[in-house]
Image (cartoon, rainbow, N blue to C red):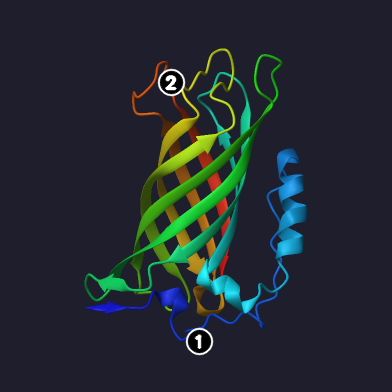
Amino acid sequence: MVRAPSHLSGQHPGFHFSDSTWSIYPFGKKNMLAANGAFNVASLSPPPEAGVWFDGMAIETGNSDSSHCDVELSRWAFQKHWGKSLILNHYWELSGYWDTSIGIWNTETSSSNKNILDVGFTPVLRCTFTGLRNSTPYLEAGVGAHVLSHSSVSSFRQLGSAFEFGEHFGIGILIGRRNRFDLSYRFQHLSNAGLNAPNRGINFHILRLGHYF
């Protein structure tokens, strides 16, 4: 049995956004200031045709503990849900979405590239628990591709290529009216899967705040 994902149920099929003016503020890190300004501008109601391309937006902030230098991550992401979900049983359903992102890795050491651009595209599977009345917890996992502006994070952290595979595991909760707000934690690993040496990879702990239209 399939149905529309719980946070999209009851919406007009054309995804008209005229009543969804909103603003989201990031978590206070220095490298989030530019993203905060962009978010405030973009928080004005998107045009109706935006629903053709995405039905959700999110901002992420994260930190790596594996790079031998302090790396802070900020990202802006857009989601497009697959439209149907699979009912596993009375309490659980399986759904998915495309996640397209653009972000900056910011480092502080003199031996590193201080700003690395990160563009990613990831299909994500999400398993949601539908047994609660006012919120919807979920688990999710995704594997996708990322293109970086530099393959060297620092002299100790060489990624081998600008093309990286990214996989993440996440836990989160949908809250608010029609579950339109999304709060989550992700653990993400990026590496080139041994296609080029060295392949040291990098891990991120990420907090994510999203909104669905």
On screen, residue 176 above or below 207: below
The residue that label 1 is drawn on is 12
Q: Which mark is residue 30?
A: none
Q: Residues within 10 Å of mark 2 (few under 14, many from 20)?
A: some
Q: Nearer the viewer, residue 139 or 100?
A: 100
Q: Residue at x 58, y 23 (%)?
A: 153
Q: Residue at x 35, y 73 (%)?
A: 130
On screen, residue 17 above or below 202: below
**In this image, 16 relative to 161: left or right?**
right
Amino acid at pointer 2: Arg
The residue that label 2 is drawn on is 200
**In this image, 138 relative to 182: left or right?**
left
Amino acid at pointer 1: His
Residue 68 percent across, percent down from the top left: 56, 18
Residue 149's image quarter?
top right
Element type at mark 2 = loop
Residue 100 percent across, percent down from the top left: 51, 53
Q: Residue at x 50, y 87 (%)?
A: 12
Residue 30's image quarter?
top right
Residue 168 percent across, percent down from the top left: 41, 44
**In this image, 199 relative to 49: left or right?**
left
Q: Residue at x 51, y 83 (%)?
A: 14
Q: Which quadrant is home to the C terminus?
A: bottom right
On screen, residue 209 above or below 90: above
Mark 1 in CB contact with mark 2 (< 8 angstroms):
no
Residue 204 percent across, percent down from the top left: 51, 36
Q: Earlier in the sequence, mark 1 or mark 2?
A: 1
